[in-house]
Image (tube, grey):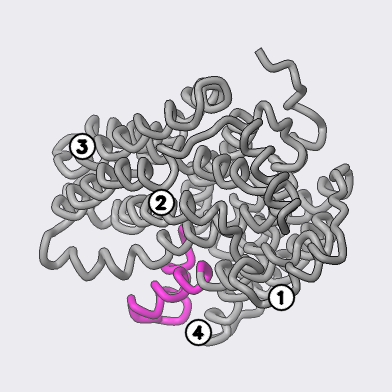
């Protein structure tokens, strides 16, 4: 059993700060379409853009953040991200037209992209290498809990206290996160002039970590599959007359992740990523199949459990793999590469899948996504699974690459 300490003060601070950051994301994501419709009488397409343009802003910012974080400094980028996010959030109080709202949403996404890339990179440097899978798994719970609590809280506040209360709460949470981050002690990364020069160049490797691209490509398909749940579950549940039960879907999802995470993270480190990844693809696929055949509330919640066991495990494990296969000094770039592909799948998914729904319906949509998840098993095997090596061998490989470069 690995005795390296995981639950340090710094690990708890960065995980909590990340939870509050993602909570503000999900709080606003759950209500911003309704806000645009009711406040500015936006048509459905523009209201949807108010939601999706956030992801575009985050993608643009991650391209910058990943290649610049080691040059700027992890702590500086973290502070910049939190302050930028707070300032943009305060601007929601003075939005008076739809174009202004779209600009704010784009900038909000960019600020979020900076801050979340910084937290993901920092936590990778804090977690002991021998407990990386377990540590990333627990850290990812901050996203899972935010995804479960945020939409609930956002809709509740909008209905009972008005949209402004969402903005007030988000501002408070961001202030708490920023203050907490001031007490972080972050390991410094010393870069040579040659390494700094490479990061400032405009080659593909300056924006993406090549070693992380294979698993990141798979994460794009994971994001595509998960977007079918995020974007269309409400409409699907209305069609089934199960709206009240559907509100508990993400609670079941979060509960499954909470129960499984202590085991899956430890198995990742002790038995290897393949031991965790292959069953998780299958579980995610089963969850989508159950979702496609739902007629009763119980099976909707059961689908939430399987999706949590599948996607919840896959997303955390894939991030851990991206960091594991990349040189330590490029952990920031590996983190941003992973999230760019994952966010791309989640962001583009609703548009692509929305074109299919009139033809195949919601049930056909979820069956199709289940097939994609099964196909991902073979894609994963080809891109990463068959090449899986131990952490010690990866370290030796990176040393040889550094010597050769």
Q: Position of residue 26 (x, y in %)?
A: 52, 54
Which residue is farthest left? Answer: 359
Pick whichever of labels 4 and 3 is earlier in the sequence.
4
Sort mark 1 into few (<14), some (14-19) or many (20+) by Cα contacts within 10 Å.
Answer: few
Q: Which residue is mark 3?
A: 290
Q: Residue at x 48, y 43 (%)?
A: 315
Sort mark 3 into few (<14), some (14-19) or many (20+) by Cα contacts within 10 Å.
Answer: many
The CA distance from mark 4 to mark 2 is 36 Å
The CA distance from mark 4 to mark 3 is 39 Å
Instruction: Work out which quarter of the rendered image holds the N terminus and state it.
Output: top right
Q: Main secondary structure of the magenta part?
A: helix
Is 385 located above or below residue 71 in the figure?
above
Question: From the viewer's perspective, is the residue at label 1 or at label 4 nearer?
Answer: 1
Q: Secondary structure at mark 3?
A: helix
**Is 32 colored magenta in this rendering?**
yes
The CA distance from mark 1 to mark 4 is 38 Å
Q: Which residue is mark 2?
A: 218
Q: Secondary structure at mark 1?
A: loop
Question: From the viewer's perspective, is the residue at label 4 or at label 3 nearer?
Answer: 3
**Is 99 colored magenta in this rendering?**
no
Q: Are marks 1 and 4 in contact (CB under 8 Å)?
A: no
Sort mark 4 into few (<14), some (14-19) or many (20+) by Cα contacts within 10 Å.
Answer: some
The segment highlighted magenta reads: 30-55
Q: Which mark is residue 201?
A: 1
Q: Is residue 140 left or right of residue 66?
A: left
Residue 19 picture quarter:
top right
Pick whichever of labels 1 and 3 is earlier in the sequence.
1
Q: Which residue is mark 4?
A: 98
Is 200 located above or below residue 162 in the figure?
below
Is 283 located above or below residue 331 in the figure?
above
* Residue in the foreground of this view, choosing between 55 and 339: 339
Q: Position of residue 272 (x, y in %)?
A: 51, 27
């Amino acid at each position: 059993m690995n005795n390296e300490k995981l639950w340090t003060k710094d690990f708890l601070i960065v995980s909590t700060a990340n939870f509050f950051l993602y909570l503000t994301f999900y709080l606003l994501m759950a209500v911003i379409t309704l806000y645009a419709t009711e406040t500015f009488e936006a048509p459905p397409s523009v209201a949807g853009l108010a939601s999706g343009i956030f992801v575009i802003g985050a993608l643009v910012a991650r391209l910058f953040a990943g290649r610049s974080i080691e040059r700027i400094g992890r702590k500086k980028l973290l502070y910049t991200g939190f302050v930028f996010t707070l300032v943009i959030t305060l601007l929601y109080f003075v939005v008076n037209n739809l174009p202004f709202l779209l600009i704010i949403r784009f900038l909000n996404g960019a600020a979020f992209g900076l801050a979340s890339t910084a937290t993901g990179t920092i936590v990778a440097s804090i977690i002991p290498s021998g407990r990386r899978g377990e540590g990333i798994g627990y850290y990812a719970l901050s996203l899972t809990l935010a995804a479960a609590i945020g939409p609930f809280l956002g809709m509740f506040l909008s209905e009972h206290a008005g949209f402004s209360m969402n903005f007030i709460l988000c501002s408070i949470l961001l202030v708490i996160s920023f203050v907490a981050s001031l007490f972080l002690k972050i390991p410094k990364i010393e870069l040579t002039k040659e390494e700094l020069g490479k990061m400032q160049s405009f080659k593909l490797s300056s924006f993406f970590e090549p070693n992380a691209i294979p698993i990141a490509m798979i994460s794009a398909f994971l994001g595509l599959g998960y977007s079918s749940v995020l974007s269309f579950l409400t409409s699907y549940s209305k069609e089934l007359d199960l709206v009240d039960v559907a509100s508990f879907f993400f609670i079941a999802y979060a509960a499954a992740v909470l129960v499984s995470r202590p085991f899956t993270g430890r198995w990742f480190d002790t038995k290897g990523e393949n031991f965790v990844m292959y069953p998780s693809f299958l579980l995610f696929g089963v969850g989508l199949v159950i979702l496609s055949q739902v007629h009763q509330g119980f099976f909707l919640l059961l689908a939430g459990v399987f999706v949590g066991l599948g996607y919840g495990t896959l997303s955390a494990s894939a991030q851990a793999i991206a960091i594991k296969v990349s040189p330590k000094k490029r952990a920031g770039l590996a983190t941003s590469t992973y999230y760019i592909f994952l966010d791309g799948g989640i962001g583009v998914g609703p548009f692509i899948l929305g074109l299919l729904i009139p033809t195949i319906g919601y049930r056909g949509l979820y069956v199709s996504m289940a097939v994609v998840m099964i196909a991902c098993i073979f894609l994963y095997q080809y891109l990463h699974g068959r090449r899986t090596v131990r952490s010690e061998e990866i370290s030796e490989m990176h040393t040889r690459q550094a010597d050769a470069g």
